[in-house]
Image (spheres, grey):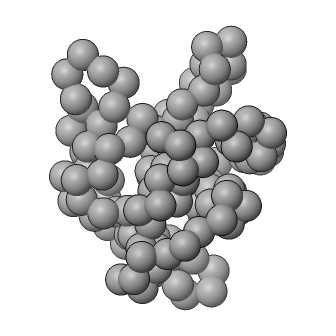
């Protein structure tokens, strides 16, 4: 469950956004995950060939922000910097999408995509 709304500002002439306020998510184990204010995110970065297919992912930007924070080493768990593995960040993406009631096919597609291609972006953004 997301405790706070996503508040972000688009960075002119780019595909990036900056968080105006922290975004906080409570997982199924009652742990509090937070993407910090000031963090830059590109929301869902997908290869061009898939962008049209994944247009529906835009309806769930909160999940992408939490995932980006994990990939960038900026995610907090219960107010402490979390050393999240790539697998943990990907699992958290899936859980956030499920919690947001995203369609199962979209969840499967996004999760599979980050598992296959996410190694290029993990801690390298």
Q: Position of residue 84 (x, y in %)?
A: 59, 69
Q: Position of residue 124 (x, y in %)?
A: 53, 43
69 vs 10, nearest the viewer: 69
Vertical side of 13 occupied by 83: above or below: below
Q: Position of residue 53 (x, y in %)?
A: 68, 20
Q: Residue at x 21, y 38 (%)?
A: 9
Q: Position of residue 76 (x, y in %)?
A: 42, 73
Q: Residue at x 46, y 79 (%)?
A: 77
Decide if residue 41 is on the left or right side of residue 102.
Answer: left
Q: Residue at x 57, y 35 (%)?
A: 57
59 vs 27, nearest the viewer: 27
In which image quadrant can residue 103 be found? top right
Decide if residue 68 is on the left or right side of residue 97.
Answer: left
Seen as rendered, the residue at the extreme top is 49
> Is residue 124 shown to the viewer in this render?
yes
Vertical side of 67 occupied by 92: above or below: below
In which image quadrant can residue 11 be found? top left
> Is residue 101 shown to the viewer in this render?
no
Vertical side of 89 occupied by 40: above or below: above
Decide if residue 62 is on the left or right side of residue 123.
Answer: left
Q: Residue at x 47, y 53 (%)?
A: 72
Q: How many marks?
A: 0
């Amino acid at each position: 469950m997301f405790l706070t709304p996503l508040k972000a500002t688009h960075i002119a002439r780019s595909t990036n956004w900056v968080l105006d306020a922290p975004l906080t998510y409570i997982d199924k184990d009652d742990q509090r995950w937070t993407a910090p204010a000031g963090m830059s995110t590109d929301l869902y970065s997908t290869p061009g060939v898939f962008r049209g297919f994944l247009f529906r992912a835009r309806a769930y930007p909160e999940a992408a922000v939490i995932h980006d924070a994990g990939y960038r080493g900026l995610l907090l768990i219960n107010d402490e910097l979390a050393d999240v593995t790539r697998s943990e960040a990907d699992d958290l993406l899936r859980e956030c999408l499920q919690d947001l009631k995203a369609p199962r096919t979209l969840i499967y597609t996004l999760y599979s995509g980050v598992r296959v291609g996410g190694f290029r972006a993990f801690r390298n953004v």
